[in-house]
Amino acid sequence: MVSSERYKILKLLQKNTKITRYLVFDEIDKCKKVISETKKKLNSEDMIKDTLKIDYPGLPRITDIFISGENHCTVCEYVEGESVFDYINEKGVLDIYESLDIFLKILKMIKFLHEIKPEPIIHNNIHHDNVILIDEEVYLIDYGIKDEKKNPYIAPESIIGNFENKQHDIYSLGILLNYMITGNFKKPQYSNKQQSSIDILISRCTMLNLNKRFDDVGVVINECNRILNKIKAEESENYTPLYATIGIHKTLFKMVKLFSEQKDKSIINLKSKKVLIIDTDVLHPSFNPNEYILNESFQKLIDREDKVPLKPAVKGTEVYIIPCDLIIENYENIVFTQLEKVISDYAEDFDAIFIKCSDFIYDSLTVNSIMIADQTIFFMNNPLYEIKLFNSISRYLCSRHNMDKKRFNFIMDKSDSKKEIVT
């Protein structure tokens, strides 16, 4: 590209085999802009018109599109501010609230781009230099990285030539969140619950296996909001702990009763016997709905919401269960967003909430549910039979999610005693 009467080149911002970008001065609008030059053609005049109409807070507006020789040029606003990279270098890493606030704003921008019709726009260049902070505002620009070969934000599959897709952006987003929290690109090592949840969120965004990586930015937004709500709840004095569990109902009910009576609070600290069990099992062999007796006061309360039956597990106790009438579609790829409202509605009424999981979907379930669970517990009825399953699950989860081993226990049901073995 050569300078025209309107656009005067100030400096080269980026150049590679795909694209060249210049910082220019617009003699008509009297301001700096960025021109991106590529050989990739826009498919139609309609697409050009649609591109010029793109307008969303935080995204530089495209002001012009033209042809220069064999190259197609796109002109957009120039955003001048402090990058996340400069901010962290000067002031240190961001705290959880700052990181999630910036991250959510960027997620909404990417969601907007991904939902553009007829074809989504893949940003494919998300990194710490392209996130600009101006006061309370966040901008996502597209000015490039100098050394692409050493760019940690590039999704591994794109290096081997896979076509651009939404998951490439999601991978970059996960790396960006990790960088804002840690200041580097190493997998974070956290101990507290909020940061462990964020670590798992980062892992889901950056999975090498595309089948296990998030494929929808909307889901990532939901998970971020859930983490924020969880942090706020845990900072409250009335926080209700949440546990993901696996094991038969009989053992689970017995263990819940023991927890409520125990003096040693090293495993689970219950303030009383008032416990809610959310049963996500479908046609589990140990489930017998005839054993549960309707509690009218809770039934009336829940009928006003989703008409989900809430029943006591054993007559005369304060242990209640939402049984398998609560059907969740796509069980093999379950996300607990559907349970969020139920959990929030009843959290204040109970001293602990248990989410009952099925062993055959435990892997896919915990990838999502562990994010909202304070602890994962394996209730064993027959340790000799189930120990191999427990060991394989514990090794897998602790390595895959970098879980604190103290957060993954098994409880052995033997007579009326209990025994804890920490992996």
Image: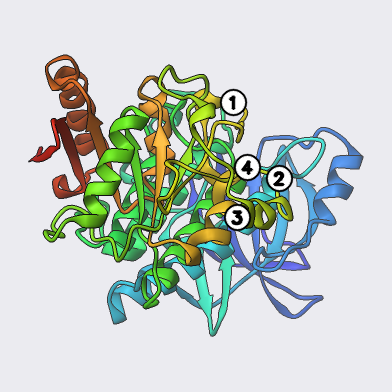
Amino acid carrying label 2: it is: Lys
Residue 163 against residue 236 in the figure, above or below: above
> What whole-number distance in Å separates the C-alpha atoms at marks 1 and 4?
21 Å
Image-quadrant location for residue 277: top left
Residue 167 against residue 87 in the figure, above or below: above
In the image, 186: left or right of 23? left
Spot occupied by residue 147 in the image (x, y as percentages of width and height): 36, 48
Name the element at disc 2. loop
Task: Identify the residue under disc 4.
Answer: 309
Disc 1 residue crowd, few under 14, some 14–19, many 20+, Cα 10 Å: few
N-term-proximal mark, 4 vs 3: 3
**Residue located at (53% from left, 59% from top):** 346
Q: What colour scheme does the image use?
A: rainbow
Task: Identify the residue under disc 3.
Answer: 298
Q: Nearer the viewer, mark 2 or mark 1?
A: 2
> What whole-number distance in Å separates the C-alpha atoms at marks 2 and 1?
21 Å
